[in-house]
Image (tube, helix red, strand yellow):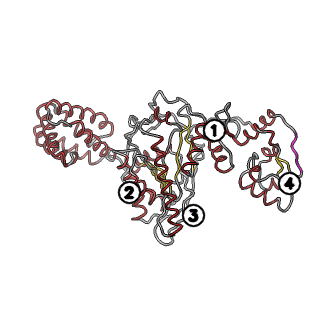
Amino acid sequence: MDCQAARTYNAIVSGISFTSVSSLTFVSAAFWRRSCCPPDLDKAGRRVSLTLSLSLCFSNSILWVGFRAALLSSKAFFCFSLPSLMIRFADASRTLRIIPDSDQILLRVSRLCANVRLNMGMDLGAKLAILADAAKYDASCASSGTTRRDSRAGGIGSTTGTGICHSYAPDGRCISLLKILLTNFCIYDCLYCINRRSSGVQRARFTPTEVVRLTLDFYRRNYIEGLFLSSGIIRNPDYTMEQVVRVARTLRVDHQFRGYIHLKTIPEASPELIAEAGRWADRLSINIELPTQNDLEALAPDKSLARIETSMTKIKARIKEAKSERRKTPKAPVFAPAGQSTQMIVGATPANDASILQRASSLYRKHDLRRVYYAAFSPIPDASSKLPLIAPPLVREHRLYQADWLMRFYGFDVAELTTREELNLPLNLDPKLAWALRNRDKFPIDLNKAPREILMRVPGLGVRNVDRIIRIRRWHSVRLDDLTRLRVPLSKAMPFIIVTDHRPSLLERETIVSRFIKTQEQRELFQIAA
């Protein structure tokens, strides 16, 4: 075993003769009663101790070995020894009729032993490797939109990004935050999640103090600009949320940390805990995971779409209330100044792009979300038969982001981006170009006359360049040279625009499509660029 304490303990116990098992049993039983049994079950605890003593001294000495190994052993021994220990214990208590509610007591004992085991024999680096890897499936890690803070008046950290090195994964996700889970142990059994209750992945758990120390150390080394903290559900939602909030509160209050903090909140947690989370965090998020309730019932029966949206509504109300108070009193406390976000998994269910975008549009409209993130499903080990065996193309995730951007900033509606005949976005064309090709009767557009909302629909023109074109045409007519200086992709825009020195020829739709289609290459979700 790796743990020095465990090796020392084993050496001591191995040197004790078998005749002293009884005395060691009663000492261990006392430790059991003091550590695992709640105060109101003290009598039950004594009976547990008696049952353990009888089992060890007169029935089966292997039970003592299993108990000792369950507390101070390697992960593999723990996983195989503890379940059998619990079963033996329950059977003994039922046979002797000593403890009527033995199953409830033993359930609490097993959870305590699991929590002890998560932190035993594992250094901080090993925990970081496990829990940082477990957090990579959460895509919502942007750090924009919050209030400007710095440490010139005291404290540590800044949200302005000065001196911070931003890194990006090969698939485009920002990894400039310390992005970790508090623990990958979870009482839920969501089939699409690698950290589900029935998964055989290696478990680990940070203490709040360890997360605080890692965040401060990484920030001082200029590795990160803030913290993205999520967690599996341990014990119950309130306990887990309290641990997550404790990290943020310690950073803000005890260490005057002024950097960015993003906390994942739990819909089932109490409103008081969510309110405190918003007090310390820049952004809160609740993952909706799947677009429909039927999908959740099939893959995540512990989650409810109505419960998630209710929590989002409460967060929205608190954000508005805090903004209103700050307009009256600038020193009033903020509440999640960067707003709230969510994430949906793409490709884990048969849900089409139209239903995903409809759900995203509804969330933006009802809850004022800052972002909806899309994460392509990645096949996991020992997956359920309800899940697909092959990951969806990553370009599908990319097209959803493009469509999301068009809805938020370009005035497009879901019904314009998808049709009844094509419920999924085309993979070989970006959504804006696909819409333009379906609506050739609306083109070409004269850049010198068209209003802003029409210019926004021209392929190749972004929000910034549209505003620049409007400013340019106040002084002179727009020409191709102007578009070149603005770095407009002329190969994409020219078939759809009219300027002083250019008018497109009439081309068939198939001819235009062939100009823009590119061969798509499927890449792994976490493929590292060579």
Q: Residues within 10 Å of mark 1 (few under 14, many from 20)?
A: some
- Magenta region: 501-505
Q: Which residue is mark 2?
A: 246
Residue kind at label 2, given as amino acid type: Arg
Q: Position of residue 273 (x, y in %)?
A: 39, 54
Q: Secondary structure at mark 3?
A: loop
Q: Secondary structure at mark 2?
A: helix
Residue kind at label 1, given as amino acid type: Val
Q: Residues within 10 Å of mark 2 (few under 14, many from 20)?
A: some
Cα–Cα span, label 1 and label 2 = 39 Å
Q: Which residue is mark 1?
A: 395
Q: Which residue is mark 3?
A: 162
Q: Quadrant of residue 301?
A: top left
Q: Secondary structure at mark 1?
A: helix
Q: Which residue is mark 4?
A: 479
Quarter of the image that includes the N terminus = top left
Cα–Cα span, label 3 and label 1 = 33 Å
Cα–Cα span, label 3 and label 2 = 27 Å
Name the front one of labels 3 and 1.
1
Q: Position of residue 19 (x, y in %)?
A: 10, 38
Q: Residues within 10 Å of mark 4 (few under 14, many from 20)?
A: some
Q: Earlier in the sequence, mark 2 or mark 4?
A: 2
Q: Residues within 10 Å of mark 3 (few under 14, many from 20)?
A: few
